[in-house]
Image: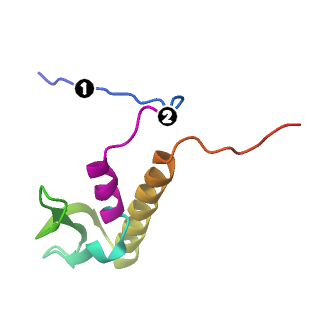
Amino acid sequence: MTYFYYKTNTWGNSDQQVSEDTRKTWEFFAQKKNWRIVQLPNGYYQTECQSLNPDNEPSGEWTDVTRRETMESAEAAIDASIEHYKKRLDYAKGPKVVKTFK
C-alpha cells in the first residue's frame, strides 16, 4: 500500500517563510558548477548534482537526477533545473507586485 503526503503553502501572509536551510539548498542547486554530466555504458547521459551534507556543505558525493539520450538534452535538463531553483528563490521572497492601479 502506498501513502501520499501532500503539503500546501500559501504566500498570502508573509509569516510563512522558507527555512534558511532550504534557501541555502536551493541556492546550491541553482549554481551550474554543482552539476555534471556522465556518460553511461549504454550510451545515455546522466545528469548528476553534488550532494550536500547536514551542514549544507558539498559532500563530494554525486546524486543522479535524470538520464537523456544526447549531451545537449542532458545540458538542457540541467539548465531547466537551475531555472526552477532560481524561480523558487525568487518566489521565496514573497508575492511580487505585477500591476498596480490608480
Residue identifier under label 2:
14
Query: Looking at the rendering, in which quadrant would you find the N terminus?
Result: top left
- Magenta stretch? 14-28
In the visual, does 60 lie left or right of 19?
left
Within 10 Å of disc 1 (Cα), the crowding (few <14, some 14-19, many 20+) is few
Residue ID at (30%, 26%): 6
Q: Which amino acid, by three-letter code, is at mark 2?
A: Ser
The residue closer to the viewer here, 85 or 42, is: 85
Q: Which amino acid, by three-letter code, is at mark 1?
A: Tyr
Residue 77 percent coordinates (x, y): 38, 65
Residue 15 percent coordinates (x, y): 44, 31
What count of labels does the image hold? 2
Q: Which of marks 1 and 2 is nearer the N terminus?
A: 1
The residue closer to the viewer here, 79 or 95, is: 95
In the visual, does 91 lie left or right of 99?
left
Residue identifier under label 1:
5
Which element is circle 2 on?
loop
Query: Looking at the rendering, in which quadrant would you find the C terminus?
Result: top right
Q: Quadrant of residue 52?
A: bottom left
Task: Please state which of the two labelled residues, at mark 1 or mark 2, is closer to the viewer.
Answer: 2
Residue 7 percent coordinates (x, y): 33, 27
Q: In this view, does 79 lie above or below 102?
A: below
